Image: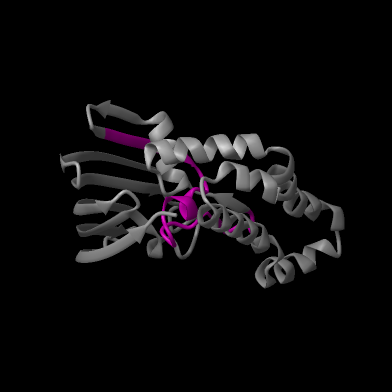
Amino acid sequence: MLTAMQKAAGSPVVHFFVALSLCLSLAVYCSSWTFYGAVGSATESPWSHAPIYLGPIFLYVFAWPVIRRLLAVGARHRVTSIADYIGARYGKWQLGQDDFRFMFNYGSALGRYLGLNTYNDGFIDVDGDTDTIDQWGAFAAYQHYWTPQWRSTFSVSASGADNPSSTEYVSAENLAKSYQSVHANLNWLPAPRLQMGGELIYGYKEMEDGREGSLSRLQFAVKYAL
């Protein structure tokens, strides 16, 4: 596996960090929270956990060409996350050097994937049954190059949840109902892999009981892509 990673990388420094990142991604399956969290259920059904640990190992060992292709596509579209990759492949319009990206998601128990600690995936109703919650999320973003070294992205996002009523779930009024946000940034690319910039964010949140709040944030970041 290390030999394959070295062939895919262009320099000793690059292939070292590629190998390190893949090893760390495998290590998460052997971390303490995964091990101790699985012990209880593994005592009753030990073989049910085998795919969790063997799946990633088989993927890296036997499906390296697929991973190499994903890395190549990611580098070509300059993506930095799974969401960026999906948006680049399936929701992107190229407008010269600029581009417009969009995505829409709808499903049950998507709360943890739409945003960190945003919505509940499910609830236990008054009858003691476990039910999931339908949720949706969407974003649209336009990236514009002012010059080859300066670019900006303007984006909007929104999401919502079809939460249960208080008769179905006693704590329903404390659930989040919707989120919206607006982002605008300016980034400087002094070198091919180096990026510096700042972003202005405005966010809004509404709860099921009618409470609402908003925030504004100005943040700065420096990123170097290996």
- Name the one closer to the observer, 16 or 210: 16
On whether residue 120 falls in the magenta region, the answer is: yes
Residue, x 68% and y 72% (percent of image)? 32
Counting labels gives 0
Asked whether the viewer can see residue 35, the reply is yes
Magenta-drawn segment = 100-129
Rendering coords of residue 42 (x, y %): 82, 62
Quadrant the C terminus occupies: bottom left
- Name the one closer to the observer, 4 or 75: 4
Q: Specify the quadrant of the image occupied by residue 25.
A: bottom right
Does residue 20 lie above or below 157 as drawn? below
Rendering coords of residue 132 (x, y %): 55, 49
- Name the one closer to the observer, 26 or 226: 226
Rendering coords of residue 193 (x, y %): 35, 52
Give the left or right position of residue 60, taking residue 15 as reference: right
Residue, x 40% and y 54% (percent of image)? 225
**Furthest residue toward front:** 12
- Name the one closer to the observer, 206 or 25: 25
Asked whether the viewer can see residue 212, the reply is no
On whether residue 33 falls in the magenta region, the answer is: no
Rendering coords of residue 138 (x, y %): 34, 41
Residue, x 68% and y 51% (percent of image)? 2
